[in-house]
Image (spheres, rainbow, N blue to C red):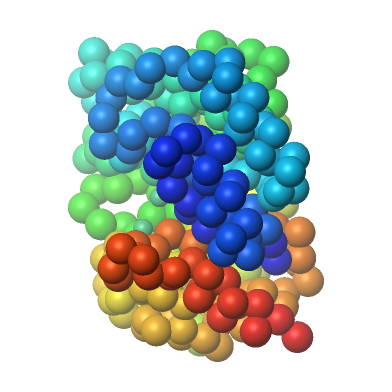
């Protein structure tokens, strides 16, 4: 597995690569705009060049962005949905400009009975607006909190089925989320991949979010923990980083430093590297 982390772009987008290198990452995830604000200034040529130069200097790849948290492409309010499609388009444009492999997206939240087709239609619209782009959209597996879409393999499959451009759609398997959603990666490691393969197809599993979980199996909570310190534990991660099927698959950790200078990613990357046999 290619080991990575969600790195900060504070002080300049290119700095995420320097931080990733410092943490001994193979690849990184970034935000291309503030995850909690709608608007962002267009990227400047100079920023893009610096980012791409830092990528070729550090050779970290493949890299992805995480779409803003406010985006809800399952919104049943037509006006809000149209706005969400516009913002998803912006996310795809920025990621393409920066040469990223994909944009990781929470599929949305909605109690609408048509929520699967709302998501798929939104994706089709955003793909139509970004014709010819290489950047993929990676649907993240969710923990099943509230009425979030995408906590089951069946829902992810159903969305993918309705997306016209299959080349640009894939899945980001979040270990914390799927464990919380009720996929027992700890006690039924092979069973979970067998089921994923049967329902979605393992070739659609494009990347991982490598997070341990503060809450237990099937808890439907989304609270990340450091590798080996949560309810998932080291055993699973040891199997995963040594799994030949995922030898070239990137995995990104998403953790918050405990204090200002806490080298949380360096510590956890090291932990994962020590598990590789
Ligand atoms: Zn996420
Ligand atoms: Zn999460």
Quarter of the image where the N terminus is located: bottom right
From the top left corner, tell me how far across and down residue 54 is, in percent. 66, 39
Against 155, residue 174 (above or below) is below
Viewer-proximal residue among 222 and 250: 250
Whether residue 126 is visible: no
From the top left corner, tell me how far across and down residue 247 is, in percent. 76, 65
Against 149, residue 86 (above or below) is above
Whether residue 41 is visible: yes
Regarding ligand 2, which quadrant of the image does it lie in? bottom left
Residue under the image location 53 percent in, 70 percent down = 266
218 lies left or right of 265: left
Viewer-proximal residue among 34 and 147: 34
44 lies left or right of 101: left
Viewer-proximal residue among 179 and 65: 65
Viewer-proximal residue among 172 and 224: 224
Against 235, residue 63 (above or below) is above
Quarter of the image where the C terminus is located: bottom right
From the top left corner, tell me how far across and down residue 232 is, in percent. 43, 81
Residue under the image location 66 percent in, 20 percent down = 133
From the top left corner, tell me how far across and down residue 150 is, in percent. 41, 49
Callout count: 0
Against 69, residue 133 (above or below) is above
Residue under the image location 61 percent in, 33 percent down = 51
On the image, which quarter does residue 250 sit in? Answer: bottom right
271 lies left or right of 211: right
């Amino acid at each position: 597995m290619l080991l990575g982390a969600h790195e900060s772009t504070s002080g300049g987008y290119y700095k995420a690569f320097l931080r990733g290198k410092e943490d001994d990452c193979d690849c990184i995830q970034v935000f291309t705009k503030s995850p909690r604000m709608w608007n962002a200034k267009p990227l400047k040529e100079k920023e893009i060049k610096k980012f791409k130069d830092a990528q070729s200097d550090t050779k970290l790849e493949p890299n992805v962005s995480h779409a803003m948290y406010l985006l809800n492409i399952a919104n049943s309010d037509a006006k809000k949905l149209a706005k969400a499609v516009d913002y998803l388009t912006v996310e795809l444009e920025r990621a393409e400009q920066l040469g990223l492999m994909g944009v990781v997206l929470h599929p949305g939240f909605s109690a609408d009975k048509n929520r699967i087709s709302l998501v798929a239609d939104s994706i089709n619209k955003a793909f139509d607006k970004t014709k010819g782009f290489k950047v993929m959209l990676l649907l993240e597996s969710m923990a099943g909190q509230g009425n979030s879409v995408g906590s089951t393999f069946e829902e992810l499959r159903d969305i993918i089925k309705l997306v016209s451009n299959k080349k640009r759609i894939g899945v980001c398997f979040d270990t914390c989320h799927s464990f919380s959603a009720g996929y027992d990666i700890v006690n039924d490691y092979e069973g979970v991949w067998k089921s994923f393969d049967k329902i979605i197809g393992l070739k659609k599993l494009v990347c991982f979010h490598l997070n341990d979980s503060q809450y237990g199996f099937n808890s439907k909570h989304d609270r990340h923990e450091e590798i080996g310190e949560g309810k998932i534990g080291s055993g699973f991660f040891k199997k995963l980083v040594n799994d030949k099927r995922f030898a070239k698959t990137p995995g990104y950790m998403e953790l918050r430093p405990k204090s200002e200078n806490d080298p949380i990613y360096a510590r956890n990357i090291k932990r994962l590297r020590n598990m590789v046999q």
